[in-house]
Structure formats: structure tokens, C-alpha cells
Amino acid sequence: MAGGIKKFVVGSFEDEKVLFPAVKNVRRAGYKIHDVYTPFPIHGLDHAMGIRETSLHTAGFIYAITGTTTALTCMSWIFTKDWPLNIGGKPHFALPAWIPITFELTVLFSAVGMVLTFCYLCQLSPFVKKHHFSPRATDDHFVMAIECTEKTNDAELQNFLQNAGAKEINVQVAETGWWLGRYDRDQKLYREEKGY
Amino acid sequence: MSLLKYESQQREPLVDGNKDYHQVTEDIISPIEMKPSRLWYIGFYISVALLLFGVYSVYREVTYGIGQWNLNKTIGWGWDITNFVWWVGIGHAGTLISAILLLFRQGWRTGVNRAAEAMTIFAVMCAGQFPIWHMGRVWMAFFVLPYPNSRGPLWVNFNSPLLWDVFAISTYFTVSLLFWYSGLLPDLATVRDRAKTKLRKLLYGVASFGWTGSTKHWQRHESLSLVLAGLSTPLVLSVHTIVSFDFATSIVPGWHTTIFPPYFVAGAIFSGFAMVQTLLIVVRKVMGLQDYITLGHIEAMNKVIVLTGSIVGCAYLTELFIAWYGQNPYEWYAFSQNRANLFSPYGWSYWLMMFCNVVSPQLFWSRKLRRNIAVTFFMSIIVNIGMWYERFVIIVTSVYRDYLPSSWSTYYSPSVYEIGFYLGTFGLFFTCFFLFAKYFPVIAVAEIKAILKTSGENYKVKMTEIEKADAEKFYLEEVEHEHVH
């Protein structure tokens, strides 16, 4: 998808109470929501959009056990094989004394690993250039970007958003790239969900 | 959902003044966009001056050796380690607020967590200076790192609490920094999107890592914050526990006690919250953030202070009792003579500590005093003095008289360069804090917005009813009044 140009219809909402039914209606009407940009986390919006749960915490757990094993294997090898030091005649394999360092490395590996994974998944880095649909998405607007396909009728969609309660509506063209993200792939199709 | 999150009518809203989202952005971000006030410059230059004095003191110490300090053969740890433990302790409040209070779903943390986390990071930076420069030959500092080296390889001693400290403090610093900065990303993006000048747009654009506010990103961000909070909670408890192991695993009378870990952690939270109060009372006033850091926030922190202060008080009395009950003559001598005897050389410091940490916070049982800003500010200073003396008492009164009276030390008082080093860390701390207050959002904008509409809803309903009823009653009385005449 690199290098392509895509068209988006962008609607800005001022109230999260209007946003929720709007998301539902837009999806029910069969439009593909590219993403919703909000100034703060809105609980339940990911479910309303049909985005699957993140498994970042699983990654965190894997990093954590990596830290635990790294600490334990290193210390055991160093103190029993590589250079067994006699410290007051105490056992070389001094597991209780190694718990603090094991714990600290568990936390360190998990935290650093998770933050790096988070930045990678969200494509966050100091010099990345992204298309921002609205500067007010970090202030007080909830900005819904809907991707247009060949079949989409812009005018109809704009009208639809107006009825759904959007305050500002415009059409934007954005160059797609790796940074744009493909969260729509994460979204389940509407008919796959239960209860509808 | 609303039933699960029922809030009492007695709970005041966390943000005063019926604000909307844009108003929140405006209030918190606009100080960054304005030129700093004269007061800011004065404070900043004083801090830089202190920092420079600290740099000079450290220069003297490195060039001429540890002899520049008044440590002697008995008191090998004096002001330096006292200051180290004091600063690390202060560095506990930030992570406690942002991690433990997040897990306990305490909404009031949103007003104070950003500044408290920043304070944590700066305090840990200051703390780290002391053990590093205390090494004397500081250019050998990398010897504390375990790596295959050309010295044998000679490894570090993994069984030593001093090495545990190296791991604990560096992990704590790294994790706190990551937690703080990942929380900052959305707010830095807010500054970027409002920026009028090119330079600001560029700098905040770089600093915000291209944050867009995408729903998927927020979902991951929430997961990240929650797991980091879960990791930081045992971490924050482990750090001061390990610091206390430095003392508790030795056989020095007055140090060799199992009560140290919980007692140190409670003391750390106690002093940390006091420092948060000192800073935030000034910040809210100078930056006009009274609507976000309300009396309710100050009161909540004072409650933590009275709780942890009382835990510390219990610990003092317990260790005193156990020293007597344990019937170890050396232990009892350390407590009865070196510390509790007012007329022994350092007896004054023990009683000063007792007064500042145990007696004075009891004032906060009174709601009126908890909500009094002048009293809170004064108390926060008293508590920090008290907590400094706690570490001084533990360190100096235990080591100045050894098992052998022949090796008892003369009276220890710090040299000008020891004091200068301590003042220098104040300079470092406040220089960083002034820069933070100028260039970063001191309140977590996104988190405030998330609780803006839900906090204190029932309180607002109650107040509107009372106001309406009052107005009606007032009107009826007026009418009656007119009828009579």
C-alpha cells in the first residue's frame, strides 16, 4: 500500500455522547471507519468500533520472564562456574540473596520491552511524519476518518455524518504509507459481531 | 456502568469551575506558550547558582579526595549517605501516586501525578549523585557494572545489598522515566497542535513522537499504563526496601533490625508526599492552577501524610521497645544512650526527628488544618526536615560509637564542601523542576479530560438542588418581608 493516495471523509464531533451512536450508525451503514482520533482515551470506543483487544500485556509478560531467566542464569553461571567467590564461607549458589536483582531485572526488561513494543506498534518515534486529520483531535474534538472506496458517494457520506451529529465535515486526501497504520484490518466486520 | 461507579454526593468534583475540554487545554498549556514571569527567572537563577556551588564542591572532592569531607575512620557514612537516602525517599511519592493510586482507582491522582512523577525523576537523579561521588575515584564508577572484563574477569558481588542498590535505583529511574514520558506523549502532541511558532511546532513535534490520538493507540496506551503501574507498584516498594537492606543486613547496633524495610518504605512515602505538597502549593499559586489542584487534592495528600507519619511513629516506638526487650546490650546502648538520651552528643537530633515526624503530623487529624494551605506548606517543610534527621540519626548515631570505646569518634559536623554538595543537589533538583514547569504540561491534560465530566457529578446535582432551594426560600422570604411592611 506504500505510495498510494487515499481519500477520507472526516467528521469532527464535540461530544462523546453523540460520537458513540454515530460510530454505530456509520458502521451499520456499511462504511469503513479508518480511525477515530480523540484527545483522551474513551472507554468502550474500541469495542464500539469493533477493534480487537490489544495483546501488549502478553508481550510484557514474555519480556518479564526473559528478564527473570537472564538474571538467574547469569548470576548462577558467574558465581558457580565462571568465578566462584568465597564470601564468608556462604554457599556459591545463594538463591535468596539473588532475589532482589532478579526482581529488578524482571521489571526492567518488562518495562523497557513493553514501551519499545508500544512505540513500534503505534509507529511512534521522534522524527516520524504523519498525516493529522485535525489539529483539534488533541484538544476537544473527536475526529472520525472514514476511508472512501470507488463505490463511496462523498456527498451522501457527508450528509450522513451531518445527520449523525458531526460539527465539522471535510474531505481530505492523504498519502498512505507504513506510518498511517491499518487499524481497519483490526476491525471485525459488522455482521460478524453477535447480537446484531 | 453508572451503578458500578456510584459516587457519593459528598465527593467534591476533582476539577472546579465547570470547564469544557478546550478550557482545560487552555488553562494548562497556555503557561508554556507565554514568557516566564520574573518570579520564574529569579527562582531559576538561584537554582543554577546553587547547582554551580555544588559542582565546585564536587570538583574539590574529586581533586583533593574524600578528605575534603569531615568523615573520619568511624563515621565513614555521614551527610552523603543521609542525603542519598533522603532524596531516594522523596522520589517515592511520584510513582506511588501514578502507580498505586492508579491501581486503586483514585481519581484525584490525575491532578498531581505528572508533577509528582517529574519530581520523582529529579529526586532520583539527585540521590544517585551521592553514592557515585562518594566512591572517591569516580572514574572507576563503571566497576559496579557486571560485565566480562579484563580484571580476571572479576565480577561484582551479587550477594551484596550495595549492588542490589545499583540495580534497584537504576531500574527505578528507568521505569519512572518511561512511565512519565509515555504519559507525556499525548499532552506534548496537544502542545504541538496548538503551536503558533515554527520552532515550537518542530520541537514538540519531535518530542511527541508523532502522536495522533488514534483509538487503537489509546487502547494500547491504556494497557501500557496499567501494566507499567502493576510493575511499578512492587518496584517502588522494593527500592526503599533494598536501601534499608544496606543497613539491616549489617551487624551495626541500631541497624540490624528486621523492621527496617516497611519502616523505610512508609518513611519514604511520608517524605515524598511532603515534597509534593511543597512544590504543588507553589505551582498551583504561581501558574493559577487552583481549579485543578484543589483543596480536595491537598487534603487527600495530607491524609496520606498523617497515615504514613503514624506508621513511622509506630516503627520508632517498636524499634525502641525491641531494643530494650531483646536484651542485647549493644543494641540497647545504641538506642538508650546514643539516641534517646537527650544529653548525649547527638540526642538533640533524635528528639528533633521524633517531634517533626511523629508529633507534628498529628495536626492533620483535623479537617480544618488539612484544608489550610499555609499550615500544609509549613508542615511539608517540617516533615522533610524531620525525615532528613531520621536518616542522619540512623546513620551517624549508630556509627559514631562502635563496639570498642577506643574507636569512638569525635563529634562529626560536615565541612563546607559536604554542605555545598547537598545544596548543589537542591540546585539540580530545582533547575530541572523550573525547566519542567516552563516547558512541559505540569498537569496530565488527557487524564484530566477523561475524568472531567464524571467526577463529582452527584455533588454537582446536590449543590444545584441546594442552590435552587435556597434561592426559592430567599425569594419567598423577600415576598413575605414586603407583605409585612
Image: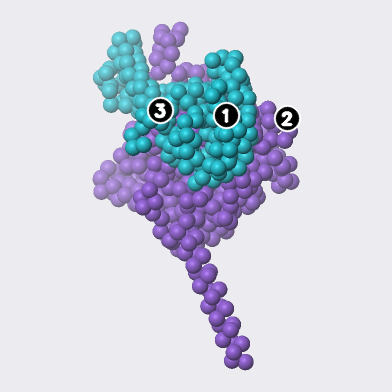
Whichever of labels 3 and 1 marks the residue nearer the N terminus, that label is: 1
Residue A106: x and y in percent read: 37, 25
In the foreground, B385 or B434? B434
Residue at disc 3, secondary structure: loop
- Chain on which label 1 sits: A
Image quarter in which the N terminus of chain A is found = top right
Q: Which amino acid lies under the numbered mark 2 shown in the image of this protein?
A: Lys
Task: Say which residue label 1 marks.
Answer: A153
Task: Say which residue label 2 marks.
Answer: B198
Mark toward the viewer: 2 or 1 = 1
Q: Which amino acid lies under the numbered mark 1 shown in the image of this protein?
A: Asn
Q: Tell me, what hue is chain A?
A: cyan
Query: Is the residue marked by circle 2 packed among few (<14), some (14-19), or many (20+) residues within 10 Å?
Result: few
Whether B345 is drawn above or below A104: the answer is below
Res. A188 mark: 3
Q: CA distance from mark 2 to mark 1?
A: 38 Å
Residue A129: x and y in percent read: 62, 22
Mark toward the viewer: 3 or 2 = 3
- Chain on which label 3 sits: A
What residue is shown at x 52% (from left), y 34% (from top)? A36
Q: CA distance from mark 3 to mark 1?
A: 23 Å
What residue is shown at x 59% (from left), y 30% (from top)? A154
What residue is shown at x 49% (from left), y 33% (from top)? B215
